[in-house]
Image (cartoon, rainbow, N blue to C red):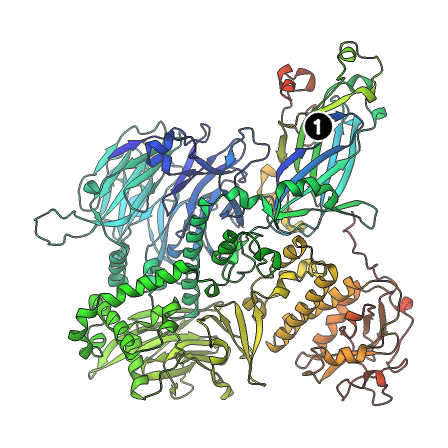
Amino acid sequence: MAKVSVLNVAVLENPSPFHSPFRFEISFECSEALAEDLEWKIIYVGSAESEEFDQILDSVLVGPVPAGRHMFIFQADAPNPSLIPETDAVGVTVVLITCTYHGQEFIRVGYYVNNEYPNPELRENPPLKPDFSQLQRNILASNPRVTRFHINWDNNTDSLEAVENQDPALGCGLPLSCAPIKGLGLPGCIPGLLPENSMDCI
Amino acid sequence: MKLLKPTWVNHNGKPIFSVDIHPDGTKFATGGQGQDSGKVVIWNMSPVLQEDDEKDENIPKMLCQMDNHLACVNCVRWSNSGMYLASGGDDKLIMVWKRATYIGPSTVFGSSGKLANVEQWRCVSILRSHSGDVMDVAWSPHDAWLASCSVDNTVVIWNAVKFPEILATLRGHSGLVKGLTWDPVGKYIASQADDRSLKVWRTLDWQLETSITKPFDECGGTTHVLRLSWSPDGHYLVSAHAMNNSGPTAQIIEREGWKTNMDFVGHRKAVTVVKFNPKIFKKKQKNGSSAKPSCPYCCCAVGSKDRSLSVWLTCLKRPLVVIHELFDKSIMDISWTLNGLGILVCSMDGSVAFLDFSQDELGDPLSEEEKSRIHQSTYGKSLAIMTEAQLSTAVIENPEMLKYQRRQQQQQLDHKSASARETSSATSVAGVVNGESLEDIRKNLLKKQVETRTADGRRRITPLCIAQLDTGVNATSTPAASSPSVLTTPSKIEPMKAFDSRFTERSKATPGAPALTSVTPTTVERLKEQNLVKDLRPRDLLESSSDSDEKVPVAKPSSLSKRKLELEVETVEKKKKGRPRKESRLMPVSLSVQSPAALTAEKDTVCLSVPAPALKLPMPGPQRAFTLQVSSDPSMYIEVENEVTAVGGVKLSRLKCNREGKEWETVLTSRILTAAGSCDVVCVACEKRMLSVFSACGRRLLPPILLPSPISTLHCTGSYVMALTAAATLSVWDVHRQVVVVKEESLHSILAGSDMTVSQILLTQHGIPVMNLSDGKAYCFNPSLSTWNLVSDKQDSLAQCADFRSSLPPQDAMLCSGPLAIVQGRASTSGRQAARLFSVPHVVQQETTLAYLENQVAAALTLQSSHEYRHWLLLYARYLVNEGSPEEGAVEGATASHWAESPFSAPLHRVSGAARYPEGQVACLGLPWLQQGQGHTLAADNAEDHLSPRQATEGRGDTGRRWAIPCQHQPSFLGRLLLFPGPVAPSEGGTSASHSSLPPGPLCRAGAGALPCCPGVSEALPGLPSPARSQGGR
């Protein structure tokens, strides 16, 4: 079983202008002291079409982690607009928070993000070239998609093999690059097809 | 009978494979398939029992759900104490869950249902061994063992006191093992498998007792589970799926000779589960009818693939009730309530049914006392059949039992406080850390959060600890670590005292708090009550029996009621003698003194007119027979049978010792009270204060030793024998060398003045006795100084504040075992947390850590535990190196005087190494009993890798070994360091004033050039890592 389980991720300062940093307050519980640090990453999916446009906004080490409940705030700069395809700048995309231990990802929390112009005029007639300074980012905080992966928590390659040998389910624990929206567990539900109302409830 | 199907108990339509009701009857667990994982759910029982509660929306129905199993859960079982829940599933794992009391309701993050977990159950152990799906798990009576069975054809026995230790793997089945049941007496465990056999295994040596195949010959097809069950009186074992004349049955197997003459017939398809009612019943007495006692009987529920359930009484030929079509699919599991009047049944169709019987239907349940009386009369006495009620008054035969008893009491306390706590709002507890609400913390989190850069420039955040976990797995050994809440742990630290009284109250009653200092008013009251009852009842009986009290236990050892009488008489008698009342009343353990044995034993003391000692330790009473496991590897156990044969009117007692199958036996003329053994010696203490010692092969080593007063506890380690008498004197002998190590040393000095008891006794392999006291302190007796030395204190605030985590070699952390570790328990993490939470200034923490580490080094030295000494010394050295500031600077000249004060200089004279600071001061360390080689590798292997050129002075000893000494710059470190690999050439030459206060002798000397050789630092230590800790390559 996972030594670390994420208890909550609170999205702070939401909604906020496109250029303001992402800020997540993450609380997690650790069942026994970890020998190494956890590595957390925020990945911004620039385009649903391709992984090419993924931006790792920041990665941070968290440690030392003794047994207990802990929290920290993970802050990362806004994505670089120049790396986002113009057609994907406005609309729904995804931000991912992942955590790895020993280089193995064990949890992936995905949030839908809606980038839109708060100004109704701009919303009606969006400029051809997206105006990022006018965009507002709205994270669908109430509906995180959490995917947990089974990893080997012991710093021991032998035991990893053992686990792999006896656990055929492990292989499918790491399908990290399938589906248009990775890891959200909704392969068929690309942003464009999202029902309208799912964003309304923000 | 009432029948209810609570529809709200479901796994969203997925099958439920297992159900188990908590021993306290307030909740139950189900296990089965979840969304894409296994699922364990804990439910509230009251909405099942009461309609009003079911309708009341404020009463939660689901208490907690755990999705941690990776695949379907096949079995959930509560431990008998109710503390733990074990679950086993298709992911080959067994998880052991414990309730976390420190925090209130929460949700499972990311779960769609937004279901709040009212209770928090955390996985405290994951047991991995099986290579296939785990089908069934079972706790042994009194939770000493946990058994699991799997489709890998094996049964694994886990040490439930020390997960994840495996005690045995039972191999023998040639098919999937699908059911397990423990004999209520604890002598056997039975398993049923698809290989058409039912096997019974002995718990003594984990070997096969018998394999029963005949009733299963015709069994074809498979059932998902084969949950068999043992009757509560131990007489019958009932199998799942068996066949008789092509009809499916549940086979009844008699304990006597494993006969298979009877079965439960009637189900149309295979029987999947059999579950005995935990109670034994007797016919309901009708008013006016004669009080002729009827034979007690058992009650058994049988569930089948044919979707029907039958309930049988062993006194009836036909089932009491049969319920057809209870479910849409096969019945998978059955659980009785502890009062024996209700059952929960679960099915593959994903639903659960509850049956409620009345006492008229089932009969009068026997009390636990009556039940254990049946056990005792049938099977004799052993730890395994002790009931909890009995335990508090049971005679303590060995420290194991003492420990066990204490644990039980602790748990009761814990339960009490837990239930009391429940009424107070759990959320407010969770929401406050160090007087600060969670909200406040959250507001300031970003500011407070410590962010650093690693060597490779990456951001590193130190997370803020908001709550500590109670890792109370080894609750016996680490009370300090197992405090369930961060709020309670650092009770010594000032801010806490000003805190809400509710919390302080709570901290007292948690398992973490040392037992007897924290006797709460309720316990005292409880104990008083018990005594009161005892005091009152026997008054009128006193006159008639007190004159014959000595003969009775001999004449009628098996007469239980008589014994009971004795027991009571004894209490009153004691009172008459005016013994210090407080002493024995407040100690929970001391209740055990009131036994017939104590009576006779006490007569001894009285006859000799020994003045009644102020201290009185519990004494073991004679039993008909008992067994004692000496060691498991090699397997060695002692069996004692008292009064087996009578020769010319004299009754003899037999002592049998079995060592890896080889057996020897001997007879003694008086009854054996207690026994102990090691791989070298076996010793037994008999009545009349006799102590006999035998070699491991059965040769009598000495004529019986006459003890000064009756025995309380006997212990053997190697060739050392330790006897603790009831008058609280301690002796240790080395029977091979025939010398006394400790001579009748009184425990008065460590026990005096308060209501303390000895909670654990340890004899190290060097013959050093260690007493763990109920107040959390541990003392060892130092034979050379004839002093009791404090080696451990659970409330030591140093230990709580010390933080040397950074210096712990990761792989080493768990490896250090020895007497000190046993006494102190696993290194607690609480202190580090406390220090962090209460933001102790760094300097203070350094000082406390240093003091703590020095204490540890000294304690390990006194205990002569070389491994631990090495471990702590290394830690100490590492800590100094890690904490020392790397800035350039001169070592202050105060070294020598500091050094003289340091704990090492005085008692240690044989110096095996020495070191020199750059300016010429010398530090040294004696390793009086470590072998030279050990002392060397210590530094050579492990310390160097943390030393940097800037920090270290180093050189090469005349043996060619490299040594290195970090030089410390902060005055507080001066003179503390002490590492030295190679023997320094003893130099009789020039000494300097700076170390004149060092012990004389073959020491070392200061001054450059005095040491054998001193090459340039950078030359000799080219490849040392920088002092900044490497971040593992990230």
Few, some or many residues within 10 Å of mark 1 (<14, 14–19, 20+)? some
For residue B927, above or below residue B353 = below
Q: Amino acid at mark 1?
A: Asn
Q: Which residue is mark 1?
A: A14
Q: Residue at x 81, y 45 (%)?
A: B458
Q: Is residue A25 left or right of residue B233?
A: right
Q: Nearer the viewer, residue B870 or A31?
A: A31
For residue B656, above or below residue B524 = below
Q: What chain does badge 1 belong to?
A: A
Q: Secondary structure at mark 1?
A: loop
Q: Nearer the viewer, residue B582 or B780?
A: B582
Q: Residue at x 28, y 58 (%)?
A: B372
Residue B202 percent coordinates (x, y): 37, 59
For residue B812, above or below residue B58 = below
Q: Is residue B648 left or right of residue B1008?
A: left
For residue B73, above or below residue B958 = above
Is any atom of residue B333 visible in this view?
A: yes
The tally of labels here is 1
Q: Where, by quadrant of the figure, is residue A46 drawn?
A: top right
Is any atom of residue B207 visible in this view?
A: no
Q: Nearer the viewer, residue B199 or A124?
A: A124
Q: Is residue B489 left or right of residue B708?
A: right
Q: Where, by quadrant of the figure, is residue B978 drawn?
A: bottom right
Q: Is residue B945 left or right of residue B515?
A: right
Residue that protrudes farthest toward the front in the picture: B498
Residue B39 percent coordinates (x, y): 49, 37
